[in-house]
Image (cartoon, rainbow, N blue to C red):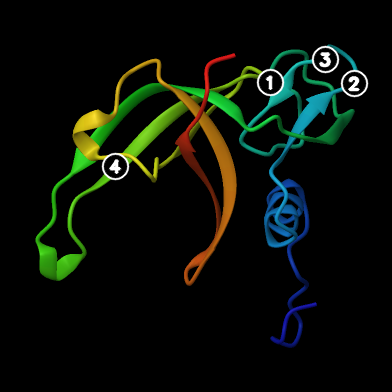
Amino acid sequence: MTDEPGRDKVSGPDEEFSTSLTEGKFRIQQCNSCSAHCFPPRTLCPVCSSRDLEWRDASGIGWLHAFTIVRRSIEKGGDYNVVLVDLKEGPRMMSRVDGVALEDLKIGMALQAHVAQEADGDKVIFRPGESE
């Protein structure tokens, strides 16, 4: 329950994903009917519409699909990247890449996920990884 009287705490796939991140784990769903992996969290498989989804530890392996550089003044925190990553399991997710100069981001580069506990919440962030 929430602290607000009369309001129940929302529970579901998003809450499960957030709880995993709080525990330092990057997990995604997999359908027990068709074996497809799903992200973002959901209640139905996007491939076969089954409700039989289970949480699995993600490999954390991915490849940079696309990126953009957001330009900001130094006073506002400086420039940063927003990326789309193709996960080894199949889904694509939005994140950012740390540990590499913005000018060194390359489409197709290998990435490795890690869970970052940040002031504004826990997140899956990527760093350059090794090709498989």
Residue at x-position 46% and y-position 39%: 127
User: What is the C-alpha distance between the residues marked 4 and 2?
Assistant: 35 Å
Question: Which is more N-terminal, label 4 or label 1?
Answer: 1
- Amino acid type indicated by mark 4: Asn
- In this figure, which residue is indicated by the disc labeled 3? 35
Above-or-below relation of 10 to 12: below
- In this figure, which residue is indicated by the disc labeled 4? 81
Q: Quadrant of the N terminus?
A: bottom right
- Amino acid type indicated by mark 2: Asn
Question: Which is more N-terminal, label 3 or label 4?
Answer: 3
Q: Secondary structure at mark 3?
A: loop
Q: Which mark is residue 32?
A: 2
For label 3, the crowd category at 10 Å Cα-Cα, with few meaning under 14, some 14 to 19 and many 20 or more, is few
Q: Residue 15 location in percent, x, y?
A: 72, 56
- Amino acid type indicated by mark 1: Pro
User: What is the C-alpha distance between the residues marked 3 and 1?
Assistant: 11 Å
The quadrant in which residue 46 appears is top right
Q: Nearer the viewer, mark 4 or mark 3?
A: 4
- In this figure, which residue is indicated by the disc labeled 1? 46
Q: Nearer the viewer, mark 4 or mark 2?
A: 4
